[in-house]
Amino acid sequence: MKRKINKIIIHCSATTPSMDVDANTIDEWHKQRGWSGIGYHFFIKRDGKIEFGRPLDQSGAHTKGHNQNSIGVCYAGGVDSKMCPEDNRTSEQIASFLLLLRFLKNTFPKATIHGHRDFSPKACPSFDATKEYKGL
Ligand SMILES: [Zn+2]
C-alpha cells in the first residue's frame, strides 16, 4: 500500500439508535454532498456487522487536514432522539470495535487511535476514543 497510515480516527454517523444505517446509506449521503462516495474506510452497523467503505489504499474524507495518512472508522449511532450527543453503542458494536481496532493496530502498529473530536470542535464520536483505546 502506498499510503502511510499513522492514525485511526473514529466517528459516529450522528444518527439515532432506531436508525439502522449502513455503509450504503452513508455512501449515498456522501455522494449527495458531492464526494466520490463513503468517506470512511469501515462502518460498524447497530448489529455489530463490520462493513467496508472506501478502499484502504485511498485517502478518506472524514477528518479535515488528517485524511491523507489515516483510516476512518464510523459506527451507526451517536445521538439521542433529540439529536444530542450520546454514547449509545450497542454491546455488539463495542465488541466489533475491539476486533477491528486490534486488527488495524496489528496491521499498522505505528498508528495511534483517536476520536474525530481530537481534531475538530465536535462531539463526534460521542465517547472518548483516545482514552478508551489507549491500551490497544
Ligand atoms: Zn466525525
Image (cartoon, rainbow, N blue to C red):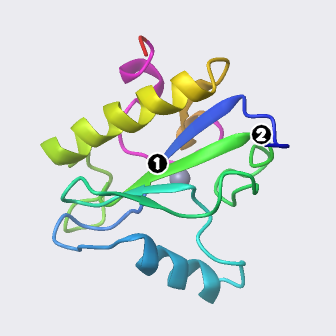
Which comes sooner in the sequence, label 2 or label 1? 2
* Label at residue 124: 1
Q: Residue at x 65, y 83 (%)?
A: 33
Q: Amino acid at mark 1?
A: Cys
Q: Is residue 18 left or right of residue 104?
A: left
Displayed quadrant of residue 111: top right
Residue 122 drawn in magenta: yes
Q: Residue at x 16, y 71 (%)?
A: 18
Does residue 98 appear in the picture of this structure? yes
- The residue that mark 2 highlights is 69
Type of secondary structure dominating the magenta stretch: loop
Q: Nearer the viewer, residue 27 or 106?
A: 106
Q: Amino acid at mark 2?
A: Asn
Quadrant (top left, top right, bottom left, bottom right) of the N terminus: top right
Stretch of the chain drawn in magenta: 119-134
Q: CA distance from mark 2 to mark 1?
A: 19 Å
Quadrant (top left, top right, bottom left, bottom right) of the C terminus: top left
Displayed quadrant of residue 54: bottom right
**Residue 23 on image: x %, y %:** 43, 70
Q: Nearer the viewer, residue 83 or 55?
A: 55
Please tell me how crowded label 1 is: few (under 14), some (14-19), or many (20+) other residues with Cα within 10 Å: many
Does residue 120 appear in the picture of this structure? no
Q: Is mark 1 within 8 Å of ligand 1?
A: yes
Please tell me how crowded label 2 is: few (under 14), some (14-19), or many (20+) other residues with Cα within 10 Å: some
- Residue at the limit of the structure toward the right, as seen here: 2
User: Of tags 2 and 1, which is closer to the observer?
Assistant: 2
Residue 98 drawn in magenta: no
Q: Is residue 34 left or right of residue 68?
A: left
